């Protein structure tokens, strides 16, 4: 696997990325001669899988916020104190 220094990467980024995309080349990025990163081509179908994961995450987040809002409504309906939760906690800290 070829190595590319930080300066060379900076100066030849377009060519290196083109080689990764078109030739499926892989590079070890070095800093002062020591390996610090890898540049690898993305797996085929990665974009579709990532899009599916993003949609699933968004749905899960929406479900979470819906459940949290319902819980807040339930707590508010059963709240028996004239003070807010923040006020009650502040009293306990004194």
Image (spheres, rainbow, N blue to C red):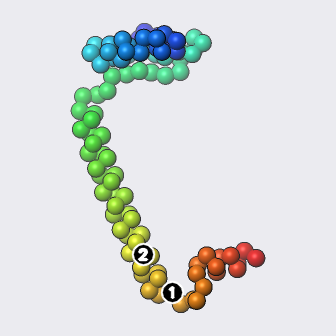
Is residue 20 depicted above or below 63 in this figure? above
Dot 2 falls on a residue whose secondary structure is: helix
Mark 2 residue crowding within 10 angstroms, few (<14) / some (14–19) / many (20+): few
Residue 10, image x, y percentages: 48, 15
Query: Picture quarter containing residue 81?
Result: bottom right
In this figure, what is the number of numbered marks? 2
Residue 23, image x, y percentages: 28, 13
Q: Which residue in the rendered view is the most extreme toward the right?
A: 94
Q: Quadrant of the N terminus?
A: top left
Tell whether label 1 touches label 2 (CB within 8 Å): no
In primary-sequence order, the first of circles 2 and 1 is 2
Q: Which residue is drawn at 42% across and 79% down?
A: 73
78 relative to 44 in the view: left or right: right
Query: Picture quarter containing residue 27?
Result: top left
Q: In which quarter of the image is the C terminus?
A: bottom right
Q: Can residue 25 be seen in this view?
A: no
Dot 1 falls on a residue whose secondary structure is: loop
Q: Mark 1 highlights which residue?
A: 79
Residue 49, image x, y percentages: 26, 39
Q: Which residue is drawn at 38% across and 63% down?
A: 64
Mark 1 residue crowding within 10 angstroms, few (<14) / some (14–19) / many (20+): few
Is residue 81 depicted above or below 73 in this figure? below
Q: Mark 2 highlights which residue?
A: 71
Q: Residue at x 52, y 15 (%)?
A: 6
User: What's the distance in space between the residues labelled 2 and 1, CA to CA?
Assistant: 12 Å
Is residue 93 depicted above or below 45 in this figure? below
31 relative to 89 in the view: left or right: left
Q: Is residue 71 visible?
A: yes
């Amino acid at each position: 696997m070829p190595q590319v220094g930080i300066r060379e990467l900076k100066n030849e980024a377009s060519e290196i990325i083109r080689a990764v995309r078109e030739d499926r080349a892989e590079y070890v990025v070095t800093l002062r001669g020591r390996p610090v990163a890898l540049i690898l081509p993305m797996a085929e179908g990665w974009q579709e899988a990532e899009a599916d994961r993003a949609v699933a995450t968004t749905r899960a987040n929406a479900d979470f916020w819906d459940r949290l809002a319902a819980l807040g409504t339930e707590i508010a309906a059963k709240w028996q104190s004239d003070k807010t939760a923040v006020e009650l906690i502040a009293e306990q800290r004194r």
